[in-house]
Structures are given as C-alpha cells and as structure tokens.
Amino acid sequence: MNAASEIPPVAIDSSVVAGLRSIVGWAHLLEDPDVTSSYATDWTGRFKGAASVVVRPANTGEVAQVIALCGEAGIAVVPQGGNTGLVGGGVPLAGEAVLSVRRLSGITDIDERSGQLTAGAGATIAEVQAAALAAGWAYGVDLGSRDSATVGGTIATNAGGLEVLRHGATRAQLLGVEAVLGSGAVVAHMGGLMKDNTGYDLAGLLCGSEGTLGVLTAARLRLVPPSPERAVALIGFASTESAVASAFILRRALPDLQSLELFQHDGLDLVCRTTGTAHPFATPYPVYLLAEVAAQRDPLPALAEALDSVTAIGDVAVAIDSVRRSQLWRYREGHTEAINTLGAPHKLDVTLPAPVLAQFIDRVPGVVRRVAPRAQVWLFGHVGDGNVHVNVTGVPPDDALVDQQVLVYAASLGGSISAEHGIGTAKRPWLHLNRSEAEVAAFRCIKAALDPMGVLNPNVLLPPG
Ligand code: FAD
Ligand code: MLT
Ligand code: ZN
C-alpha cells in the first residue's frame, strides 16, 4: 500500500513519448532512470517509485498539451513541484508520468499599492518572499522547506507552516489561480479583486486538492504588511500541561504573535547532537515553547509583559538580533532533518481540539508503543494551531500499524488526521476517520467532473474504489 520498495516503470508507447517530446523539447523529456530517480523518491525516502517519464513543460500551453496527450493515451500523471511533500502524493508510486512544473517560475505583475503579485507554480516560497520584500510587503506563508517548496505544491497541499496563526494557511493567501484541469481545460481567474462573489471558488477548491483535479500553473497571491521588528522567546516547561496552558495565554496576550511552536527534550537533544549545537539552557526541560512576535515597532515590551503573566516558566531565552533569533529557531526547524538521519520516518501530522491537546501529546507515545515497542516517537509542531507532528522512527516504511494507531487515536479525540501535509498516498486508507461517506461521494463527483479521464494523481487522496 505505502510503496517503499522498487517499482518498475510502466512502459509508455514510443509514439506517446515522441508526442511529449515534440511538446516540451528534447531536453525536457527525461527517461534515463538515473535522472528520473530523484523525481520518484520523496523527501523522507519512505516513498519510492519509478517514473515512466518526467515531462518538464515551460508554460501553461505546454502543460495543457501534455495533459491532453496523456489523457488520450490513458497515462496517469503526477504533478510535482519541489518534491518536499511528506505524504507520498508527489511521487509516481505506480509508474505514472511525472509532470514537473518547476520551469514555470516567473514572478510578475507585482502591485506595490494593493500588495499582490502573480507567481508561476514553479516559483519557490523563498523567491515569493524575496519578491514581496523587495516590493515593501511580505508573503504570509513560511515553512522550513521554503527554498524548494513551490507555489503550486503549497497550493495543492494548502500548506500551513510557521505563520498560520497570524495569516492563515495557503488558501487564505489566494486571490486567484490559473490551472489546467484534468479535462484539459485551462481556467484562470487572476483579476486579484478582494471581493468577488461570482460563483464557485475554484481557487479554494483546487487548493488542497493534491494534484487530483488540475495542474496549477500560476497564482495571484495577496501579500501582508511587513513586520520587521522581531523578538523570539524560547521557554522551558516542566510539563506538557503547563506548556500548552501557557501557549493559550501567550496567544491571547500577544496580538503580534507570528509563530508559536512546541518541541520536547528528546527532539531538542537529537537536533543538538546532529548539528553539534549546545543545549539552550543548563537545565533540560521536558517541553519547550518557541514564540516569535513580529511588529512594526519594538515588540519586546509586549513580549516581556506577556511572559511575566505566565507563571509556569522554568527558564527563558529571548533574542532580538537576527543571528541569535536564527539560533533559537534552529532548535525547532532542525527537527525534520535530524529525524531523517535515523531512517525514513512515519510522519503523522494531526490537529487536536484545544482541551485534549496536552493529553494527546502525553499519551500518544504509549499508543504507538502498544504496537511497536521499540519505536521512537518524536513530537513537535505548531502548538498555536493545535497541530502536532508525530514522527515515528524504527518502524519499517511499509508497516502501517503505527500510522493506524496514531490516526485513530487523534480522530477519537475529535482531531484531524491531516493538519497541513495532506492525505497523499500515506493516509488514503484513513480518510473515513474524518470524512463521511456522503462527503467522499461528493469528492468523487467533483473529481469525475474536473478530471473525467482520471488522468491526474489517481492514487492520491481518494480511497481506492
Ligand atoms: P510537491 O512535494 O512537489 O507536491 C506535493 C503535492 O502537491 C503532490 O500531491 C503533488 O502532486 C501536488 N502538486 C505539486 N505541484 C502541483 C501543481 N503545480 N499543480 C497541482 N498539484 C501539484 N508543510 C507544511 O504544511 N508546513 C510546514 O511547516 C512544512 N515544513 C516542511 C519542512 C521541511 C524541511 C520539509 C521537507 C517539508 C515541509 N513541509 C511543510 C511539507 C512540504 O514542504 C509542503 O507540503 C509543500 O507544500 C510541498 O510543496 P512542493 O512544491 O514541494 O510540492
Ligand atoms: C514542520 O513543521 O517542521 C514541518 O511540517 C515538517 C515536518 O513535519 O517534519
Ligand atoms: Zn509543520
């Protein structure tokens, strides 16, 4: 089910390969397995397949031609951006063709007055952030994969990240999108009007559709006013309960709170060992919060006042200069890479209702060890959004029992089995934990309408059948 072993590519008729080559040119139709393998393995190494071909179109017209040709030939297509997805949704696990949008990377039509820009689906989030900054604005989405994750990929997954509590997830940044639907039709609604109630919200629908309905080719993005003055606090706590309770206090006390993250001692220790960094405090704490406040004027007084109102603090380090702020952030952002050094992790990304958040964090390791006694469980995440990343190492890639345990436990507490990474192939069997039969039936109707030939990512999101 979660393909982790080598899968042979599906042979494509040579006339189809020739047709694709004539659309994108020789240099952008890749067949050599040594070249295509990086498109066929996900970032974690847990999901490995083989692409029949990799096609790299240069513009929307070429994308439309590729989809039309693949549809006629009955060839399934996996759209791919930066290949940083964490649920196996962007790699060809059943020998599909990969359609890489990375060449559609232009950033145009920057409107400095209204704070908007148009980005090609292949532009990276770091490139959008830099363009926004140069125009006197900021982009409201930030995530650790910013240098590789693309506009198209973040829209397709409705990526969350580090600033959701302030600016919302990716869907909240969309003023319009351009996409090639599975039917081959090109839809574009890029006028950038703030208010525009003219029918169905196609941008909102394509956002989070994980490449199953259309290939995103460009987006009109709203920008947010910049908040250049920043302060970061790293706080140690004696218990999860006190950390989570304090997180809620900080959230209410600090209107300029930009990020509110949680991690634990084991994860911090792993990051320190892998990066050769010293621990932040002389005394270790079981749980840590990292809070960043970002404002147009000095945010330190407000942060200090808010920290004074939190009684359970064990230790605190505050940073205002950018070097020290980055050092504190590294303890949190270093988790993903540090955990990957232990072998392909099972990454379970869940949201919990506030009243049971601390209980989930404390009990989920026991829930995992009931079926995998020797597994290691790493917990961190965006606590301000109720989002916990449960990473499990020491379990074979295709053993789904651990995933089942964690997702069933989260859902039993009223949580979501996917906070921000999507369903992909990794969580397909458990969609029913959050979605009713009627909802899944409605999803299938939408899929059939927009992708009648079933060409786009047929093995993702919707359960088989
Ligand atoms: P890909 O991995 O290429 O694809 C992801 C999905 O989108 C696939 O289903 C694919 O088919 C589809 N897709 C890609 N491009 C298109 C397109 N143009 N049209 C239609 N469908 C498309 N995620 C978060 O939400 N929050 C985080 O904080 C976060 N931090 C991360 C940190 C690290 C170090 C890493 C490695 C990953 C992190 N991620 C995070 C996960 C990942 O970066 C996001 O899911 C991101 O949105 C994926 O973008 P991508 O361009 O790499 O997409
Ligand atoms: C994060 O918050 O660091 C990302 O979602 C990546 C991960 O879950 O490892
Ligand atoms: Zn995350």
Image (cartoon, rainbow, N blue to C red):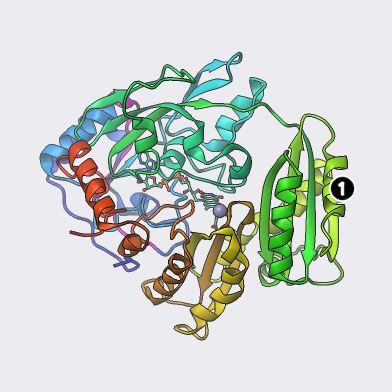
Q: Position of residue 337 (x, y in %)?
A: 59, 60
Image-quarter location of ligand 2: bottom right
Q: Amino acid at mark 1?
A: Ala
Measuring 49% from the left and 60% from the top, which residue is drawn there? Answer: 349
Question: Which x, y percent locates residue 310?
Answer: 82, 57
- The residue drawn where x is 87% and y is 47% is 304
Dot 1 falls on a residue whose secondary structure is: helix
Q: Please, which residue is most extreme toward the front here?
A: 355
Nearer-the-camera pick, 404 or 352: 352
Name the one closer to the observer, 414 or 135.
414
Quadrant placement of the N terminus:
bottom left
The quarter of the picture where residue 16 lies is top left
The reply, left or right, for residue 22 in relation to residue 214 is left
Residue 136 sits above or below residue 167 on the image = above
Range drawn in magenta:
47-60
Q: Is residue 25 visible?
A: no
Q: Is residue 278 above or below residue 31?
A: below
Q: Is residue 64 visible?
A: yes
Residue 201 percent location from the top left of the image: 36, 30
Displayed quadrant of residue 223: top right
Position of 67 compared to 281: left or right? left
Q: Which residue is identified by label 1?
A: 304
Residue 200: in magenta span = no
Horizontal placement of 251 versus 279: left or right? left
Front residue of this view, candidates 116 and 386: 386
Magenta-colored stretch includes residue 51: yes
* Residue 223 in the image: above or below residue 15: above
